Image (cartoon, grey):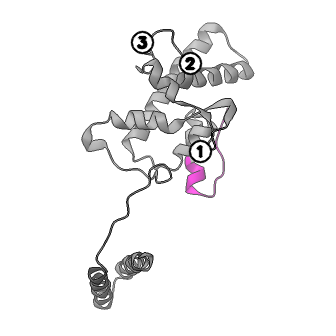
Amino acid sequence: MSFRRTSKTLRARRYWDLRGKHFTPVESREFSKLTRKYPALQRLIASRTALWAGFVQECQRKGWETEHRRFTEWRTKVVGFYGRQRAKRKRDKDTGLTVETLANWIVKKDVHGREYRVPKISPWEWYDWVFQRLPEELKWDTPRGHRTKQPDVEVDKIQTRRWVEDLKKSIERTTDEREQARFRQQIKNLEGSLRKR
């Protein structure tokens, strides 16, 4: 099945690229918020590629020839990857995770506390698990502000106004249009922070 689409936006291109790498629609929708530069996302892609390669071999072994059967079995495998339950606390052979961790990857209630008829996967739990296990030099912040609110930073108003004045002088001194645009954006950001207080 091909997932190539003519996409107008970068986010849409990322979405279809992830779909082509065998991510589910839910995973692709969430992870398309990130660029490929993030090491955790690169690890997720490598993990999913390995899971798909194993699945292809399983299809050949078991003789699953119809596309409908392969689609159904793949969906079952991915859901199992997120929600597999064990009778005892032991590590999962595919992910190395314990039963308790896997259970947290399934969202059973919506934001209002109502139970879903069909539990949904939670891609960010998988992302966070991979992110926490990266070496320190590969742990970069990611644009996930909707999940964790950043604390407000208090800046002295007088100092902020001085920065604005310095930036205005820098605009007058330079002839580079890109630099001028960058300085104007910084001024806009600083003035916006003054208006908030």
Is residue 157 left or right of 7 when viewed as pictured? left
Judging by the rendered image, the residue that carries numbered circle 3 is: 90
Q: Is residue 75 magenta?
A: no
> Crowding at label 3, few (<14), some or many (≥20) Cα neighbours within 10 Å?
few
Q: Amino acid at mark 3?
A: Lys
Judging by the rendered image, the residue that carries numbered circle 1 is: 29
Q: Which mark is residue 87?
A: none
Give x and y (percent) for residue 159.
26, 81
Provide the residue span drawn in magenta.
1-14
Q: Earlier in the sequence, mark 3 or mark 1?
A: 1
| Distance (Cα) linking label 3 and label 1 | 31 Å
Q: Quadrant of residue 167?
A: bottom left
The residue lying toward the viewer, choosing from 27 and 179, is 27
Nearer the observer: mark 3 or 1; the answer is: 3
Give x and y (percent) for residue 57.
55, 14
Q: Quadrant of residue 132?
A: top left
Query: Residue drawn at (33%, 33%), measured in percent from left and top?
Result: 133
Nearer the observer: mark 1 or 2; the answer is: 1
Q: Amino acid at mark 1?
A: Arg
Judging by the rendered image, the residue that carries numbered circle 2 is: 55
Give x and y (percent) for residue 15.
58, 46
Q: Earlier in the sequence, mark 2 or mark 3?
A: 2
| Distance (Cα) linking label 1 and label 2 | 23 Å
Q: Earlier in the sequence, mark 1 or mark 2?
A: 1
